[in-house]
Image (cartoon, rainbow, N blue to C red):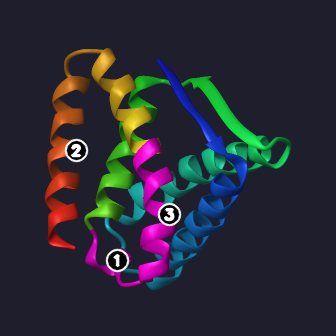
Amino acid sequence: MLIELGPVASEQVLSWTRFSRRLMMEIKTKGDTPMSAHDTADWIRAWTALIDQWAKAAANTDVFRWSEVIDCEKAAFVVHGMEKCICSGDIWACITEGDRHQQTPFTLHVMHAFLSALEAEGAPYLHHAEQVKAAIAEQAFAR
């Protein structure tokens, strides 16, 4: 399935990729992860590869745009990990108020792009996307 991000100011993307890498280090070093240890290691590898691609693309332009065909299962796995992080109290404890205001727009942009692509694939991804949206919305009101 095709995932498309942008247009977004490259400066915002680069700030977000630094923020995401910091959270990845927190997940690696804290030990209490939002997923099983095996899933967490696989998710961190998949997520880091995407972050690296986005940082590289954003470094070469003022306006970031990115698109790539991604396997549906991989996209669903990445979304699952993002959902677990967004809903994790341990992760939220690492996020400052400034981070929250600065990083939320691109986080939501990424989630929207992945969830829209999953929804376009139909069942069973449509149901998964709806569950993730509900969990994220619930979390937004809890913070």
The answer, for residue 11, to whether it is visible in the render is: yes
Highlighted range, magenta:
88-109
Report if the CB atoms under discs 1 and 2 are less than 8 Å apart.
Answer: no
User: What whole-number distance in Å separates the C-alpha atoms at marks 3 and 1?
Assistant: 13 Å
**Closer to the observer: label 3 or label 1?**
3
Q: Residue 92 got which mark?
A: 1
- Badge 3, how many Cα within 10 Å: few under 14, some, many 20+? some
> In whole angstroms, how far apart are the C-alphas of marks 3 and 2?
19 Å
Please say if 55 is above or below 114: below
| Amino acid type of the residue tagged 3 in the rendering | Gln
> Which of the 4 image quarters holds residue 95?
bottom left
Point out the tag, 3 or 2, that comes first from the N-terminus: 3
Nearer to us in this view, 100 or 132:
100
Tag of residue 132: 2
Asked whether, in this view, residue 41 is left or right of residue 131, the answer is: right
Circle 2 residues within 10 Å: few <14, some 14–19, many ≥20: some
Q: Residue at x 53, y 57 (%)?
A: 44
Q: Residues within 10 Å of mark 1 (few under 14, many from 20)?
A: some
Q: Residue at x 49, y 74 (%)?
A: 99
Residue at (65% x, 31% y) in the render: 66
**Towards the viewer: 3 or 76:** 3
In front: label 3 or label 2: 3
Of the numbered discs 1 and 2, the one sitting upstream in the chain is 1
Question: Mark on residue 103?
Answer: 3
Residue pictured at 63% horizontal, 59% vertical? 17
Residue 30 drawn in magenta: no
Residue 115 rendering spot, x and y as whole percentages: 34, 33
* Residue 120, disc: none
